[in-house]
Amino acid sequence: MQLLDTAIVAVYLAGVFALGSFFFRGQRSLADYFLGQQQMPWWAAAFSGIATILGAISFLGAPGQAFKSDLRFLQYRLGTPIAIFLIGWVMLPYFYRLQVFSIYEYLEHRFDLRTRLWGGGQFFLLKFFYLSIGLYAPSLLFVEMTGLPLWTIVIGTGCFITLYTTLGGIKAVIWTDTLQLFVLLAGLGATGYLIAESSGGLGNVLAVAESAGKLRLWDTSFDWESEYTILNGIIGGAFVLLSQYGVNQAELQKMMTTATVGRARLALICTMLIATAVGAVYFLTGAGLWVFYNTHAEKSLAGVPTDRIFAKFILEELPVGFRGLLLAAVASAAMSAASSVLNSLSTVASSDFLGRLGVREMNVSRARVLTASIGIAATLLALGVDRFGNILVLSTKLQNFFGGSLAGAFLLGMTSTRATGAGAFWGMILGTASVIGLAQISNISWLWHGLFAALVAYVGGYAISFFTSPNERNSSLVSNA
């Protein structure tokens, strides 16, 4: 790599660290460390949410998925309107009413402690594994760039992200994410321009990709086993998005740093719509990469996993300066997602477990130690991620697999006056167990898994509630109470 590229990356990383560290001083309470005293601008929360969703997993994984397949994965975004309504108009008002750090606190207020612990525990395990994937993804590129062993890059990346997130808290996460989003978009735009220029122009790229079936977007079949269809995109996709945004502390924590529910809704809508548009550009980039490497047959891809094709293009095909910009974009994608997830894991661990169970009285100093500990542990786990397949599909499947039952429990509490703590708790367990069983005995598309788990959790929890004693509840936490 040329000196100019190295300098661009180094200056960028130094700027991110300086910005993140700036918020170290003046954090005197957990409300400041985890929620920024709810004084963040809605647009900054939105940009941070977009950057998190469009992290390195998507930046490298989406083009790789499109390279080997087509655009049908994007159909799950057809569920966006349903997800926006459920999150923005059903869920968010309750979280603001309670003024919670962790959204899983709602489950105790509405049901009981064990339901809160189970919900928070599911989130923690899911996002802990997701964080490891997020640390692994950008390391693929930096391995190619430096020639260093993968383990050294993973550890270095993890430690850097952990350090500035630990120091700056949620304010550092949101403001560095905002910077990183624009770097990411600039890098993506530069890549698209260079792919088109080196493959006969944009018109030729689209024509070749279309003739090869790489731009296929819609699947109108009603086959339950077809992985991506319009039907499972609208219905199943709504619950994928509900898992990604609605019962996901990493995303909702950004929204809850704004002053009012109205501003949180604005942030949510912008996040989901813009992320959909940029996600489509990611996939079109993958189609463009397919055209490029088929146009230049002398450039061998033998033995290159699809997750590394974009990285290979950046390192081998981009001119000096542009390469540095793209490397900075990959770094920004990695850091935005990982820092957000790390901060949310610390929030849940401190609020739902250590603080709530009286293990430790939490303060800002202890929250920082906890954040650092989680970051180090996830970094070590990231060393073994490479054996699990395409990182984009893997991360989305994990989110959908375990998030569905959480969504069912939240919706049960918010829409049913009859639901009890025992019903919600056992409903979540049934939902998770059922979807695990479904995946083992059938080939039904994974896009249905979240809906299936949510339905089992909701219906099962409601039925169990008729055979258990109702618990004391706050009537303001049920929509039709």
Image (cartoon, rainbow, N blue to C red):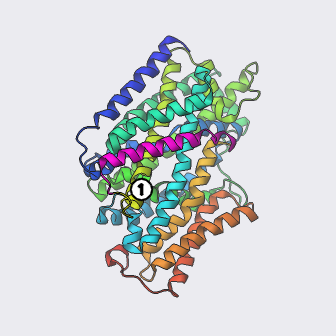
The extreme top residue here reads 3
Q: Is residue 276 magenta?
A: no
Name the residue rendered at 44%, 79% in the picture.
Answer: 416
Q: Is residue 338 left or right of residue 171?
A: right
The picture places residue 18, in percent across and down from the top left corner, at 33, 29
The picture places residue 323, in percent across and down from the top left corner, at 53, 20
Question: Looking at the image, which is closer to me, 27 or 400?
Answer: 27
Please identify the quadrant where the N terminus is shown.
top right
- The kind of secondary structure element at disc 1 is helix
The picture places residue 303, in percent across and down from the top left corner, at 76, 29
Q: Is residue 77 left or right of residue 286?
A: left
The vertical placement of 163 against 292, above or below, is below
Name the residue rendered at 39%, 42% in the picture.
Answer: 47
The picture places residue 152, in percent across and down from the top left corner, at 57, 29
Residue with the mark numbered 1 = 348
The vertical placement of 255 against 324, above or below, is below
**Count of number-bearing discs:** 1
The answer to which image quadrant residue 205 occupies is: top right
- Can residue 194 be seen here? The reply is yes
Query: Badge 1, how many Cα within 10 Å: few under 14, some, many 20+?
Result: many
Name the residue rendered at 49%, 55% in the picture.
Answer: 124
The answer to which image quadrant residue 140 occupies is: top right
* Residue range (magenta): 361-388
Question: Looking at the image, which is closer to me, 58 or 199?
Answer: 58
Name the residue rendered at 34%, 43% in the picture.
Answer: 169
Question: Looking at the image, which is closer to me, 329 or 345?
Answer: 345
Badge 1 amino acid: Val
Please identify the quadrant where the C terminus is shown.
bottom left
